[in-house]
Amino acid sequence: MKKAVLIGGIVTTLACLVWVQRAASLPQAAPSNPAPSNPAPTNPAPTNPAPSQTPPASAAASFKPVSELEHLMEGQELHFKAIDELLKDTAVKDRLKKLAMHADVLAELANVNTFNKDKTDYKTWAGQVRDLSLKLAAEADKKAGASEEELKSLRKQISDTCAACHDAYD
Ligand code: HEC
């Protein structure tokens, strides 16, 4: 009986050792694969300094909105309307939290919109909707300290900016 237990223990230990060795050898095998590709990265190395200088400009230049402008506008409309309704109804649960969320997403959609045309006035109006929406989100984030007047004033400024761009481009 004791022998059986002892042998069982040894077998289990051996099995564990084999497993551990295998497990240990797995990551070893993996790194040895990328090893051959190492020489390659050292080749482009000389060109590395160049890309590392340009990322900010090239990253912005290569960003392209993926949704149709009409759809992005419908998205802005949804969030703007949600803001509108939350401003009117002060009884909504988590009202300021929801206001901040809708304003934040509206800001991001406007941020993407700055890439939809190359015209300076277009980019400026889109950027203004973004910045005003971020301000609205920040005001709502003040919770009990948030000013209803300021929230409403920002809503109006956003709406005027939507209209300014639509007058020129829609
Ligand atoms: C920088 C310019 C610009 C700003 C700012 C702007 N829009 Fe637009 N909007 C457009 C253009 C251009 C169109 C026409 C898009 C089309 O039909 O292809 C449009 C169209 C729309 C449409 C109609 C979409 C449809 O189904 O045809 C809605 C709704 C809309 N915008 C909502 C808004 C709201 C809400 C805001 C502000 C929060 C806003 N837009 C701000 C440029 C802008």
Image (tube, grey):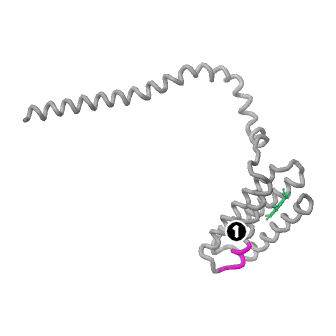
In the rendered image, the quadrant that contains the C terminus is bottom right
Residue 85 placement: quadrant: bottom right
Residue 81 placement: quadrant: bottom right
Give the number of marks: 1
Residue in the foreground of this view, choosing between 1 and 147 = 1
Question: Which secondary structure is most common in the magenta stretch?
Answer: helix
Residue 61 placement: quadrant: top right
**Residue at (63%, 23%) from the top-left corner?**
41
Secondary structure at numbered mark 1 = helix
Above or below, 60 against 146 in this view is above
Residue in the foreground of this view, choosing between 101 and 145 = 101
* Ligand 1 located in image quadrant: bottom right
**Residue at (47%, 27%) from the top-left corner?**
30
Say whether residue 89 is magenta. Answer: yes
Above or below, 17 against 160 in this view is above
Say whether residue 96 is magenta. Answer: no
Q: Where are the magenta residues, as a range? A: 84-90
Mark 1 residue crowding within 10 angstroms, few (<14) / some (14–19) / many (20+):
many
Residue 27: image location, x then y, percent: 44, 29
Residue 150: image location, x then y, percent: 75, 73
Task: Give the amino acid type for the residue marked by disc 1 in the picture.
Answer: Glu
Above or below, 93 against 80 in this view is below
